[in-house]
Image: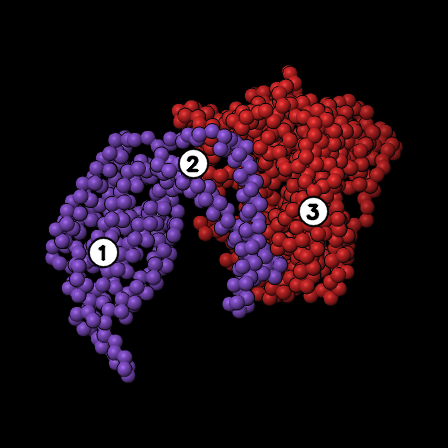
Chain colours: A red, B purple
Amino acid sequence: MGKLIQLDHLAFTYPGQTKSTLNDISLTIEAGAFVTIVGATGSGKTTLLKQLKPELQPAGEQMGQVRFHNQPLTALSSVASAQQLGYVAQDPQTQPIMATVIEELAFPLENLGVDSAAMTMRIAELSNFLGLDKLLHQTIDSLSGGQLQLVNLASVLALKPEVILLDEPTAQLDPTTAQNFLTVLQQVHDELGITIILTEHRLSRVLSMADQLVLLTAGQVTYAGPVSPGLRQMHQTPELRAFVPPVPEFFLAHELPVRPLPLTVTAGRQALQTGNWHFAVQPAATTLKVAATPLLTAREITRHYENGSAVLRQLNLTVNTGDWLAIIGKNGSGKSTLLTILAGLQKPQHGKVRLNQQIVWKLKNGERLAHIGYLSQNPTEQFSGETVIAELTAQAKLVGRTDIDQAVQTMLTTCHLTRVAEQNAFDLSGGQQQLLGLGLALMAQPELLLLDEPTKGLDPDTKQHIGGILQQAHQAGLTVVMASHDMDFCAAFATNCTFMFDGQVSQPQSTRTFFTSNFLSTTAVNRLLRQQVPSALFWQDVRLTTKGGELQSNNDDNKLTGA
Amino acid sequence: MNVGTLASTSFFSQVHPAVVAVYFVELFTLLLVFNHLILAITLFGGLLGISCWYFSRQRIVGVLKGIGSLMAVIVLFNLLLNQHGRGLLWRLTLGPITFRLTRTGLLYGCTMAILLGAMILAFILFNGILTTPKLSYLLFPVVPRLAMLLTISLRLVSLFTQKFRRLVMLQKTRGIVVTEGSWGQRIQKTGRLMRILLIDSVSSAMETAVLMEARGFGAHKRSHYQTYAWQPLDVIFGLSGLFLFILIISFRWRGYGWTTDVYQMTAGASMDWWLVLPLLMFVGLPVLGEGVYRLWEN
């Protein structure tokens, strides 16, 4: 392997900012490497990635140099850049521009003037390799998020690039779809020898594929090298600790001397067996007592699309006051539709949803807002395009708060948005937008809060923060219903969980019962320790024992970890 | 109006886009050159039949309900405005105002309404068969920039529509309910929604533009992927359509199916019947093609 990309003392400052986003970054990326860049929100991951392709470089002041094949990147022509450096964005919807899959695959080839016969060969080869051959004539609009991201990857691959840059490519996908995408990516890397550079928050799967880990803290590279030592450094760095995936975190937190650190459940089980380590359950913490008064009831809900396909089929659900119910299911299982119906934002064709005996969609909008808070999976759809403070103030007025200024200031502080109070809501980072959305939903101090994928695309720290805010509101009496495919978040915070499948929900169970009885949909630690401690969901749930069961170790009380 | 696209296994959807385009040019021409009721009914009936064949009947019934009201309005206006026609059927005098229901007004109104309905059905069929990729394929050799612009616009319009629907639903949480309040308030709220939609769309469109550039858009003279090839059936279909079109137009050239003076209009002249069969054959050519295609199966 030779040096493919070199960054020499690279620094970058956005216009109008005094503090640089990237500071003195020197890094070498070998040809054929699989590089994962990890950093907290605002650490400069995306900015760094965008410095590696001329068309993506944002406006601002750049110092230092990026070299590609030992030539300055600036000397690369547009054609060469398009051909050799591919880029896949976070949101699968932003890249496609054509109407059908086959056209989308042909688009980059047409841009470079490839003739039709060569295009046919390239598209045939690519669609077979990536399993897109059955989707070729489907319209882009009809594809799921996972399929769309695969088409985006294929469209980039069509030009036979040397490097593919990916900016959190699985952030918008559910875990299974993300897993499938990453498997394809690994195939692309292993079989085609293409250099992969990606930024990611969910590291469980990615790290087992990577051969180089780059840690970025406040715009500076604090580590670049093999994965295992990098994970140890992450665990020692407070702002990156939450990013450590559950399996290696288990070994690090219990100070089990394993080298290299296991990254998968199978490797973890083997390490436990080799080390002959045994664990016993920790005494359970006191749980919140949940009242059994029904607050929200959904009866025989049926909702189908115009084309006749059913999304919800005679669905029944009861949410009691004080519940924190997590509805777990894949993308497209109907979770979002159910939540909008529960919120009274749309009506089902059949069935009724009642909040305290009142049908939700018959409530006046103001009345509904006072009782039910709702946060969409894309919070920008609930913004007005004003500054953060103006958005919160408008919502406080709308819901009839008398202490407007105080309520707004409290919410800014709670959501850590004071620093960006004067910024436009659309210019915030994804995590900040989610926090603002939550702040807007909580402004009315509702009795019921409905959350659609509240942790989608967020880094572990922001997840932890959102979990904390919700936990506080829940303890104050808020009932929460959230749709999510984030197992760790649901296991850490929800009191009850249910599965959404085939247009219906299963009988809700207490969170621990739900996750310990599940075989696949459970936490990584549960899968790791199932044979020893079936009730364990997190590393904090167990303590290391000797063969006699004597206490060996335990510490820390952080609950949610990177997943 | 769009009721879907034709199944990719159907004969008509496999015909070369250029042949299909010529067929529709001929069809729209025929819809413009006749003003006799018999022929209007023939064209409307033929198009209705072919639409039911290719699309879901439920959707066509939905479309008919939509265009039915439009057709009724056209008939009504023609009845109101054609007060001096021949053949008085009914008279109503209310003070100084006298309303005359004439046979000319009724005939002309019905003919125009039916031809408009037929035109809408033809457009639905056109949308269902000449999809964006086919249109883009046809336009690319002539106006490549327009072809690209058309493709991009259609994708963005689709995203725009989806986003607007979601905003209408989700902005209720911010007090924007377009179905509540006075008309003034509703217009104001819709304006606010459009503003949010614009801000959101511009920001994602800019990202899309960067990603287009990242994939080499504008870096080189573009080529075009040729997805369609000529087949013998294209020639047979094209020539059959052309033959029928020329035949019908030659009849029209001799004055069949057209009355220049509105006051002379009748439901149809006896010689109009000569045109019914060729017209039905022309409109039903795709269905005839389907039959031949199926007979041709191994």
- Could you tell whether A472 is left or right of A333 in the image? right
Residue occupying image coordinates x 75% and y 51%: A418
Q: Nearer the viewer, residue A298 or B59?
A: B59
Q: Is residue A544 above or below residue A375?
A: above
Q: Which residue is mark 3?
A: A432
Q: Nearer the viewer, residue A508 or A48?
A: A48
Is residue A125 visible to the viewer in this orientation of the structure?
A: yes
Q: Which residue is mark 2?
A: A137
Q: Quadrant location of residue A486? A: top right
Chain letter of the residue carrying label 2: A
Measuring from the top left, give residue A75's x and y in whole percent: 59, 24
Q: Residue furthest top?
A: A1
- Could you tell whether A288 is left or right of A202 in the image? right
Chain letter of the residue carrying label 1: B
Measuring from the top left, give residue A448's x and y in whole percent: 68, 58
Measuring from the top left, give residue B54's x and y in whole percent: 33, 46
For the residue marked with disc 2, what is the amino acid? His
State how far apart marks 1 and 3 are (Cα).
62 Å
State how far apart marks 2 and 1 are (Cα).
37 Å
Q: Is residue A21 above or below residue A433?
A: above
Q: Which residue is mark 1?
A: B40
User: Are discs 2 and 1 both within one chain?
Assistant: no
For the residue marked with disc 3, what is the amino acid? Gln
